[in-house]
Image (tube, coloured by chain):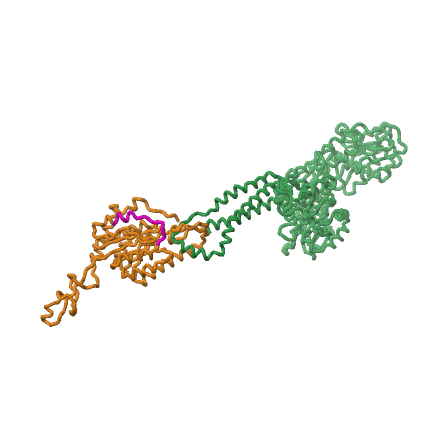
Chain colours: A green, B orange
């Protein structure tokens, strides 16, 4: 046993004056009596308690000394287990499923987690530090390491459940830190529901909610494996979990809303999930503001249901999809209310307008028109269009590199340039992809492409090279010239019949949608806590995000700026994207970083608006997640985690001292007032 | 419970105001009792007084001066006339001066002074003795109202002794000293460990009339405050540590009540008058109450 404040042990010296004072204090007052003989008869009857009376004073003194000793030891803050003095990191699961009621003790699983965390704080030894983090879609630091219990408790009080599904990689930062594992004890308080975190081996798990009622949550290997499971596998596992373990819940596992051609009809796709043991009659309502577009009676089967696909009258805009009891029907048990509502945006078709400049532009126009009918992804710019083209394709020209002049090169500041000219012809280039997953090239088998008509040229200074020949020639690069952005392909499509290859339309499409900042398909909603790249963001441009709340009366809306929504913020300060174009051609991943900068994370369910310099787009996020809504606890082990619990010794000693003083006070009271 | 004594000015028995209150009591006694106090009262014995009482047959040895010759002339029977004998009375006050009376002595002295004054005013003889472990004369037998001041001064000088009270021993001494019949008034708290029954019986056996006055104060009747206390006998100085609880308080007060009830029973059984008073009742009110009940009679 060691002491944090051993100087307080000198307080034991106070026992000496205490004894002296006590001996003086307990002397009773002298009471003269004229009827001594009467008192004698009374006192004789109480002779049996005489021994106690004699011992009482000594007992009082002993109690007082014991109380003093206990207080002195409490002030000295003893430590009985110096071997395990690692700091404690408490990671609290705040995912959607933690809203579900706990099996016992009242409240939700999250409430139980907070209670357990408070116990851990109370059980911290003197001088031992603890920190608090939350995890759902990602790991968030809530309170740094501190030995101040009040700060820890206030942090715990401020936490709340978020409507965000857990993601397998959320705990990855903990796995990466070997130092954290060595010097800290990491405890995860979770219900084990949902996507199941990939839990590093050194993390100890405290099961709460239904998991606590049954057993501990699955360990790291099980969880990691489950994270990779297919949907079918997840469903099979869901069946393995007994229905009685999960509280009854119905929620929206997934939803999509697409504007059908013509713009007056919507295609709704929705999948419901239920943890009820029996089918439940419910109702799905699609609403826009205070207007109900469609009501669909459904029977929700246990488990993850089959998707429903149906149409509804409606125009592009913001919608809410909710599931609940049918009108007039009896309410059903619903443990997690957050997953009953999905926010959707039916996006209007918005194809990328592409103009073609160059003498051989007809083949290029064919490549653009190949995507014209595919959901309006890309369309050839026509003279009648009021809008300027989004992207200009500059066809490869003759040796001089001139265009035919039908479309001015200044028609758009975003250009796809084929055949930059210059240099010697490369006979058989061996392309090597330098920027993995670059959106402009993601559909192309770059290393199998032959790059016909490529020339031995080097990208200009400041360009981001995406593909380079093994011989050193640059094959694809992106550069910024006088405010214009060019994506240059060092090939001539007219050579080697590349224009007839199916890869040519893919080259045009990938480059055009990348430069125009349009993802292929903007989802109608995303799971809260995940990222989306709003369309229209130029490379290096960070969209501004506002939360949109439609007024109940319709029409008016309230837009509230949302802070810190850039996904890149969690990793760096966002400067990498901006720096990309100013670096030399050796900067390979600059465009990918810029795209990451444009991506935003929507951390709560709702409608949002993304604003860039060129356009505004509505976005939506919802608390959707089949595993979260199913509330299936992945229970596989019953291992009990050993945690510091109860009260620290100094608290127990203080309580003991108070109890002793109370006992002595009873004796004192008896002495004073009988 | 602290033992306190009154201030000097309150204790003076020769103070004119006090004597005036005594005189008021004497006037009250004459009005209530028709001038018949203890001394100038009629006795049951008949003899050579001046007030005719009855006739009786002459027997040999009777004083032939009492033969009523007028009756003999008419009836030829020797009849003698009997006259009531008037006798003076001796009032003996036994004043408890043991240490237990220290808080009550002032009150007891005033009562003794009042009774003595009334007796002297009624031409009776007064004697006052202090009762400790024995009998200590305070006022030797006195006659006449003019000796009142002497009596009061003697009473004024009385102090408590450090002795325990032994009423029986004092009574034995008194009986030996006063063979003539007298009115004995013991003034005490009667909290006497050896009891009071034998002493009172002894007085009655000596054909004295007895009227007891019990003087107690709150300290006698009420237990000390709850809690630990070091009880000390005021007479012997012995100490004992006790914890006074509600139970002890109840037992003590019940014991005192039982003790006083036993005194009352004893007095009733033996035809002894008893006045139980407390120190918070003025002495003249007590005397008035006694007078209105007919004097020092049972």
Q: In the shown orientation, is residue A84 left or right of residue A41?
A: right
Side (left or right) of A207 relative to A24: right
Q: Find residue A471 and report its horizontal and vertical position in percent.
A: 87, 31
Along the line of sight, which residue is nearer the eye, A601 or B150?
B150
Residue B157, given in percent of the width and then of the height, sits at 29, 47
On the question of residue A556 being in view, the answer is: no
Q: Main secondary structure of the magenta part?
A: loop
Tell me if residue A371 comes above or below residue B89 in the rendering: above
Query: Which residue shows up at 36% across the image and 47% down it?
Result: B4
Q: Nearer the viewer, residue A534 or A412?
A: A534
Q: Quadrant of residue A490?
A: top right
> Which stretch appears magenta?
B151-165
Residue A592 lies in the magenta stretch = no
Image vertical order of residue A511 relative to residue A57, above or below: above
**Figure check: A328 above or below A478:** below
Q: Quadrant of residue B211?
A: bottom left
Q: Can residue B14 be seen by looking at this rendering?
A: yes
Residue found farthest to the bottom: B76
Residue B161 is a magenta residue:
yes
- Image coordinates of residue B298 in percent, x first then y, are 28, 60
């Amino acid at each position: 046993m060691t002491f944090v404040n051993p100087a307080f042990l000198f307080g034991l010296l106070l026992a000496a004056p205490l004894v002296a004072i006590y001996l003086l204090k307990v002397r009773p007052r002298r009471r003269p009596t004229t009827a001594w003989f009467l008192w004698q008869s009374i006192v004789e009857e109480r002779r049996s308690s005489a021994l106690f009376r004699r011992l009482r004073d000594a007992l009082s003194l002993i109690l007082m000394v014991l109380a003093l000793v206990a207080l002195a030891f409490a002030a000295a803050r003893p430590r009985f287990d110096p071997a395990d003095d690692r700091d404690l990191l408490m990671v609290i699961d705040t995912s959607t499923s933690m809203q579900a009621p706990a099996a016992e003790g009242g409240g939700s699983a999250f409430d139980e987690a907070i209670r357990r965390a408070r116990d851990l704080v109370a059980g911290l030894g003197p001088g031992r530090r603890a920190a608090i983090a939350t995890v759902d879609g990602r790991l968030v630091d809530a309170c740094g390491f501190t030995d101040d219990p009040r700060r820890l408790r206030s942090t715990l009080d401020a936490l709340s459940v978020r409507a965000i599904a857990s993601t397998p990689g959320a705990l990855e930062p903990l796995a990466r830190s070997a130092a954290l594992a060595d010097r800290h004890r990491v405890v995860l308080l979770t219900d084990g529901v949902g996507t199941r975190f990939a839990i590093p081996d050194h993390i100890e798990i405290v099961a709460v909610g239904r998991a606590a009622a049954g057993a501990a949550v699955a360990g790291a290997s099980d969880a990691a494996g489950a994270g990779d499971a297919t949907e079918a596998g997840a469903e099979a596992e869901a069946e393995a979990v007994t229905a009685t373990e999960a509280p009854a819940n119905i929620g929206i596992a997934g939803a999509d809303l697409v504007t059908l051609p013509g713009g007056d009809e919507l295609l709704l796709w929705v999948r419901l999930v239920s943890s009820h043991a029996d089918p439940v009659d419910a109702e799905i309502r699609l609403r826009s503001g205070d207007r109900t577009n469609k009501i669909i009676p459904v029977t929700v089967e246990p488990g993850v249901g089959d998707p429903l696909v149906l149409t509804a009258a409606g125009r592009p805009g913001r919608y809410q999809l909710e599931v609940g009891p049918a009108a007039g029907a009896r309410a059903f048990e619903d443990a997690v209310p957050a997953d009953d509502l999905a926010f959707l945006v039916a996006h209007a078709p918005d194809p990328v307008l592409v103009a073609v400049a160059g003498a051989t532009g007809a083949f290029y126009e064919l490549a653009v028109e190949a995507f014209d009918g595919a959901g309006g992804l890309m369309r050839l710019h026509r003279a009648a269009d009021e809008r300027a083209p989004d992207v200009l394709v500059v066809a490869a020209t003759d040796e001089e590199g001139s265009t035919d002049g039908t479309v001015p090169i200044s028609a758009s500041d975003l250009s796809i340039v084929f055949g930059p000219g210059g240099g010697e012809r490369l006979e058989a280039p061996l392309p090597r992809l330098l920027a993995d997953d670059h959106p402009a090239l993601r559909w192309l088998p770059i290393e199998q492409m032959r790059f016909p008509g490529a020339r031995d040229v080097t990208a200009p200074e400041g360009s981001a090279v995406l593909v380079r020949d093994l011989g050193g020639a640059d094959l694809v690069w992106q550069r910024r010239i006088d405010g214009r952005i060019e994506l240059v392909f060092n090939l001539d499509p007219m050579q080697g019949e590349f224009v007839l290859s199916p890869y040519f339309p893919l080259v045009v499409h990938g480059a055009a949608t990348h430069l125009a900042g349009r993802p292929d398909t903007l989802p109608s909603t995303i799971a809260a806590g995940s990222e989306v790249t709003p369309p229209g963001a130029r490379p290096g441009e960070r969209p501004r995000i506002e939360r949109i709340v439609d007024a109940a009366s319709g029409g008016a809306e309230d837009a509230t700026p949302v802070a810190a929504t850039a996904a890149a913020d969690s990793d760096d300060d966002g400067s990498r994207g901006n720096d990309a174009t100013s670096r030399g051609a050796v900067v390979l991943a600059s465009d990918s970083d810029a795209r990451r900068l444009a991506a935003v994370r929507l951390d709560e369910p709702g409608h949002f608006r993304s604003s860039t310099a060129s356009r505004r787009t509505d976005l939506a996020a919802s608390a959707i997640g089949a595993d979260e809504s199913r509330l299936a606890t992945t229970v596989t082990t019953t291992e009990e985690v050993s945690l510091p619990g109860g009260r620290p010794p100094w608290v127990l000693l203080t309580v003991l001292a108070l109890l002793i003083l109370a006992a002595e006070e009873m004796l004192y009271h008896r002495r004073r007032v009988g | 419970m602290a033992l306190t004594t009154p201030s000097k000015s309150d204790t003076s028995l020769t103070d004119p105001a006090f004597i005036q209150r005594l005189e008021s009591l004497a006037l009250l006694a004459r009005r209530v009792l028709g001038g018949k106090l203890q001394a100038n009262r009629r006795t049951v014995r008949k003899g050579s007084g001046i007030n005719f009482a009855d006739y009786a047959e002459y027997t040999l040895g009777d004083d032939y001066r009492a033969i009523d010759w007028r009756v003999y002339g008419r009836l030829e029977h020797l009849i003698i006339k009997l006259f009531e004998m008037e006798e003076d009375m001796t009032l003996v006050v036994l004043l408890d001066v043991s240490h237990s009376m220290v808080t009550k002595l002032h009150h007891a002295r005033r009562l003794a002074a009042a009774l003595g004054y009334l007796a002297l005013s009624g031409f009776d003889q007064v004697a006052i003795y202090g009762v400790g472990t024995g009998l200590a004369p305070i006022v030797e037998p006195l006659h006449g109202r003019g000796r009142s001041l002497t009596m009061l001064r003697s009473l004024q000088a009385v102090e408590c002794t450090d002795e325990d009270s032994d009423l029986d021993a004092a009574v034995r001494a008194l009986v030996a000293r006063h063979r003539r019949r007298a009115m004995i008034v013991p003034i005490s708290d009667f909290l006497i460990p050896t009891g009071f029954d034998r002493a009172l019986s002894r007085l009655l056996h000596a054909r004295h009339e007895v009227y007891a006055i019990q003087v107690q104060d709150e300290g006698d009747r009420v237990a000390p405050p709850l809690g630990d206390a070091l009880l000390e006998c005021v007479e012997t100085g012995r100490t004992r540590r006790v914890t006074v609880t509600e139970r002890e308080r109840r037992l003590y007060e019940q014991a005192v009540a039982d003790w006083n009830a036993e005194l009352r029973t004893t007095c009733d059984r033996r035809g002894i008058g008893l006045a139980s008073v407390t120190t918070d009742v003025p002495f003249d009110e007590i005397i008035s109450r006694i007078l209105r009940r007919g004097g020092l009679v049972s």
